[in-house]
Image: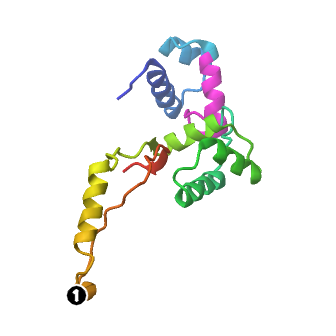
Amino acid sequence: MPTSNRETQYQTLLHLWNEGERNVKELHRITKIPIRTIYRNIKKLEESGTLEHAGGNGRPKKITADASRALGQYIRRDSSISTRTLAIKLSGIGVETSYRTVARHLKDIGYSKSLPKTTPMLTNVHKQKRVLWAQKHLNDNWEQTLFSDETAFQLFRNTVECWHKGA
């Protein structure tokens, strides 16, 4: 089902072309499509056999597939790396681009940057309770004790933004 006037024109011209109508003036009379448009579309049909857009217009991408792969590797090695540093690393492999272009590319391929979830700092009361617990259990028999705590503590708040791939 046509979605635009151009698509309707394409389909009409293609149908008439396939039916054997090759006369520009006759196509114009039947369709009321401007003669210049018919000439342009017939040229397209003769060259490529289709009225589809040829593509390839526009500026080529600065970040190629190889550069994109390299960016992914840099981020996997260090997720807190800045876009400025990434742009410098890319220039080392021959891709001159700005940090803004790097950020835009990473966003386009699904990466996002975020700050880690904030966690409360240890207060002086928490620290005192830990020392008291350690002093209380100083003479315990630790040979039969197994600690299994996977909690990570940061001495200072981490304010570094990290890149991560969205799901």
**Direction from residue 90 to residue 115 in the image, left or right:** left
Residue 22 figure quarter: top right
- Residue 29 belongs to magenta span: no
The residue at which mark 1 appears reads as 144
**Colour setup of the view:** rainbow
* Secondary structure mainly formed by the magenta segment: helix
- Residue 42 belongs to magenta span: yes
Q: Residue at x 71, y 46 (%)?
A: 88
Q: Which residues are magenta?
A: 37-54
Q: Of helix, strand and loop, which one carries label 1?
A: helix
As displayed, is residue 65 above or below residue 137?
A: above
> Which is nearer the eye, 112 or 30?
112
Q: Residue at x 62, y 52 (%)?
A: 65
On-image quarter of the N terminus: top left
> Which is nearer the eye, 114 or 73?
114
> Which is nearer the eye, 76 or 60?
76
Horizontal and vertical percent position of residue 63: 65, 45
Horizontal and vertical percent position of residue 152: 36, 60
**Direction from residue 81 to residue 159 in the image, left or right:** left
As displayed, is residue 35 above or below residue 110?
A: above
Q: Residue at x 62, y 27 (%)?
A: 42
Q: How many marks?
A: 1
Horizontal and vertical percent position of residue 119: 33, 47
Q: Residue at x 39, y 24 (%)?
A: 3
Horizontal and vertical percent position of residue 113: 47, 42
Q: Name which residue type carries label 1.
A: Gln
**Direction from residue 165 to residue 93 in the image, left or right:** right
As displayed, is residue 96 above or below residue 67?
A: above
Residue 27 figure quarter: top right
> Which is nearer the eye, 131 or 151?
131
The residue carrying pointer 1 sits among few (fewer than 14), some (14 to 19) or many (20 or more) residues within 10 Å by Cα, namely few
